[in-house]
Image (cartoon, rainbow, N blue to C red):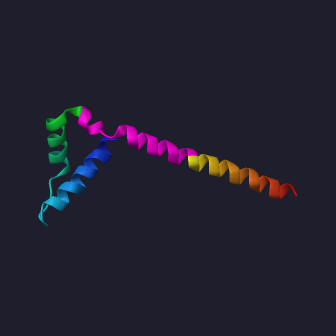
């Protein structure tokens, strides 16, 4: 999720600039890699993956439940 990390950095830095224009994407990526190496781009991957998997599980389960419920109503 490197793009999420970069997006978050840009949002935080934009607010700290006191109304001035924030850094570009390229500047943000270079600074991120300089500070923590390429692994810094994947910081927070575990919680993000857990959140996405819970969301996907809920969505698929709900879809299957409603599909079966709909099929039962059509048989009657």
Tell me the residue at 19%/32% (across/down): 37
* Horizontal side, residue 72 vs residue 61: left or right: right
Location of residue 32 in the rendering, given as x and y in whole percent from the top left corner: 18, 41
* Horizontal side, residue 67 vs residue 30: left or right: right
Which residue, as the protein is rendered here, is positioned at the far bottom?
19
Does the magenta segment cover residue 56? yes
Up the image or down, 42 lies above or below 21; here it is above
State whether the magenta stretch is mostly helix, strand or loop: helix
Location of residue 48 in the rendering, given as x and y in whole percent from the top left corner: 39, 43
Up the image or down, 42 lies above or below 71; here it is above
Up the image or down, 63 lies above or below 53; here it is below
Segment colored magenta: 39-57
Location of residue 30 in the rendering, given as x and y in whole percent from the top left corner: 15, 41
Does the magenta segment cover residue 42? yes
* Horizontal side, residue 46 vs residue 14: left or right: right
Which residue, as the protein is rendered here, is positioned at the far right?
76
Location of residue 42 in the rendering, given as x and y in whole percent from the top left corner: 30, 37
* Horizontal side, residue 33 vs residue 60: left or right: left
Up the image or down, 44 lies above or below 18; here it is above
Tell me the residue at 82%/57% (across/down): 74
Pick the quarter of the image with the C terminus: bottom right
Image quadrant where residue 1 sits: top left
């Amino acid at each position: 999720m490197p793009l999420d990390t970069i997006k978050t950095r840009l949002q935080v830095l934009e607010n700290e600039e006191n109304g001035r224009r924030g850094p570009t994407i390229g500047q943000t990526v270079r600074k991120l890699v300089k500070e923590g190496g390429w692994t810094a781009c994947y910081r927070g991957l575990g919680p993000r993956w857990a959140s996405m998997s819970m969301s996907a599980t809920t969505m698929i389960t709900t879809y299957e439940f409603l599909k079966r419920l709909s099929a039962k109503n059509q048989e009657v």
